[in-house]
Image: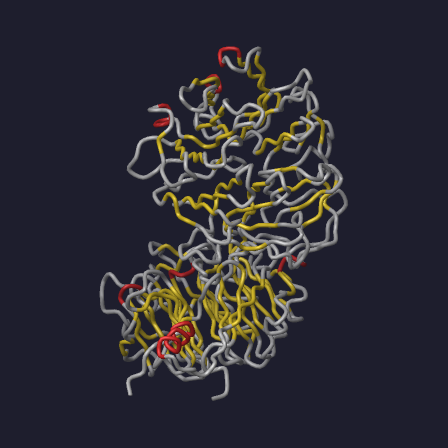
Amino acid sequence: MKKVAIGFRTLATLGLALGVALPCIAAPTYKQIPLDGGGWFSGFAVHPSGRLYGYGDVFGVFRSDDSGQHWKYLNGDLTTDDNFVSGMAVARGNADVVAFRSSKRLFTSRDGGATWTARLSDLDNVEIARGSSPVMYHPANDSNLWVAGKRKDLSGSLWCSSNGGADWAKVGDTTFDTRVAVTVYVHPDFPDQVWVGTKGALYVSTNRGISWTQVWDGGGVLNPAGGPPTVKAIVRRGKDGSAYAGMGYMATDIGGYRITATDWKNPATYSFQKTVDMYWGPANATVLADGRFITGAVHGDRDPKDPNNLQNAQRISSDGGLTWKYLPMKLSMPPQPVWSAPAKPDQTTDYGRDFIVQDPITPSRWYVTGGLAPAISTDWGKTWKYVPNNSGIAGVMTYKVNFTRKNSKMALIPGGDLCAFVVTDGGASGNAQAASFRTVNKLMSCHEVMSSDDGKILVAAGTDQNASKSMIIRSTNSGATWAELDLTNSGLPNSPEGITRSAMTPGNPNDFLVVLAGNGYDSAPRVYRTIDGGRSFTAVGVNTLPNNMNTGSRYHPEQSMLLVDGVNTSTRYLCSRDFHFYRSTDNGQNWTKMTHPFNNPNAWIQDLAVDRGTAGKLWALGGWAGIKTSNDGGQSWVVVTGFDDAKCVDAANGRVAIWGKRNGDTHDKLYYSPDNGATWSEATGEGHRYAFIKGIAVDPWVAGKVWVSGISVNVITGLPGSRPK
């Protein structure tokens, strides 16, 4: 009998159609390990009811209904990768009406982010202006949606919809054709006055966008890069009855400006005074309920030797932005995220302060963005705490999970920025313990976490992202603490993009290989070996491995793969773009060129996996070129049918997981096979689409269990083959 792929929902539907009771098959279960931080949490959208939305790079979009204590990921049902978000807005009259824009698309929701509708799919991936608000619902009309940004093949950069995003019209005729709109703002007390910041100028409309007046262009002053100044954020005081009513403040990359007027309905009376001077200008602009302004830079603080020199510090003004005082923003703990070192005395919140917003219900509660995680103040911005651990925040870019050979509960998570996380309970609790930041307080990316058989000794090789050099850290206590290796005289050449791949000899944690990043044009060896735990390295395969292999970079390790055979522990497999595939049978010392699985000059190996329980069993993905498998260590290959596209793969003990499209699919899905690819079922499902995937790992210890890396880590259990027949 021919075996076919069938899913859980398909089987249930079939039973209803036939009018018969088929055996009950439980659906898989999904658990998230959020990791409490990551990429760049860069903005908020707050509703007058207190509901809080947040977004950022890698993060996607999140929602909190309890003042930032717990967060729900809202991109889970999207089938497209739209997790790099540059703007979000919520309608003033309805907390469930919300919109966000990614690099390519604009989405809207009418149920608080439970479901989304793509309204624009042709946005250009323009440079993000942090602190800006490129998406806005007009405060007087919940159906009036504005978007700042260019669209492909269309002139203009400011767009408006009068029906919630269903239809769009270009705004400003040719005004925003060459002046690219970056941010748009309307104060609720002045609904007719629309402010638009662009790359080069500030514009105002006093009739809701019918006509526009340029009111500022920097007076010919260029930003530090030599380009025209960018207006990143605008805020204004409301009709508060004071002498400062209506006054505005804007943040640009050449300084912060106080905005006054004798008649706000007449742009000719507007006046601009620079009151904040800092390199690259302030990143944010906030107006509090009492009319005070807040501004400051993304990074930095006041001069420690001169407290009166605010440098790049956050600051606050009570006189309409004329004078400013220091805003301390002291960080206190707990909570202490697993990636964070204990707070030092007078330490400020993490870098990445693009936004500060005030809770509309409790004015003393403020929220600030962070490069790793948002923070909350309950005392008017004097002291700050990170959001609670296990709050649901998940923005760490993670890569394929690794496992030890003898500890069934241990899973090793490599990632960007925060480097290494360790799971010690098989993922049951949804918590990750131990990260490199506990003793190595640097931004480090790594793509594998290598391990001794028992999991006591861990090694992570990657990139020091601040110094742009290779970096290796080592733990001798299962990740509780880490130490950085000194590579100065180790024989390992420095690579500005660091180490992209690494592999350890089973049973010998002192013997491992590293692959240096390379773009395919270098003339130096790429692969190095140490047999003394990283104290010294020598190039391997000098006469057999080409020096011009494309081995990837700190953010693109997928250009190369380095794997250890599942059973033959001295065997290694190495592939890179373009069209290199090699095997070593002596721990990587010498290499032999093997048959490339895809004999096509346009087909690269998109991903490669070894079956951890079968000698010489390989799975190779070629994207559109399909899937091939080898039973003899890459000497010969067999086509695997049924897939139109394939991007990620892993295998263990005859169980296989593949991320791609089966015949007829309209988007990528995660498929699982318990029988070496004879049958397949979908592992993804409603609310768990995982559109942003960097790696998948089949658990070698538990049948029917798959680890999904991308936005932090997710664990799927209960897949076919995990239950007794």
Q: Position of residue 653 (x, y in %)?
A: 45, 83
Task: Tell me: residue 695, above or below residue 13.
Answer: above
Q: Position of residue 436 (x, y in %)?
A: 62, 60
Residue at the (52%, 74%) spot, across then down: 717
Q: Nearer the viewer, residue 636 or 651?
A: 651
Q: Is residue 102 left or right of residue 484?
A: left
**Labels in figure, total:** 0
Residue at the (41%, 68%) spot, across then down: 670
Q: Nearer the viewer, residue 255 or 667?
A: 667
Quadrant in which residue 471 is drawn: bottom right
- Asked whether residue 393 appears in the rendered view, the answer is yes
**Colour style of the rendered protein structure:** secondary structure
Q: Nearer the viewer, residue 469 or 365?
A: 365
Residue at the (49%, 20%) spot, across then down: 218
Task: Tell me: residue 36, above or below residue 241.
Answer: below
Q: Is residue 702 left or right of residue 521?
A: right
Residue furthest to the left: 600
Q: Is residue 130 left or right of residue 544?
A: right
Q: Position of residue 150 (x, y in %)?
A: 37, 35
Quadrant in which residue 94 is drawn: top right
Q: In the picture, which quadrant includes the N terminus?
A: bottom left
- Asked whether residue 650 appears in the rendered view, the answer is no
Residue furthest to the front: 19
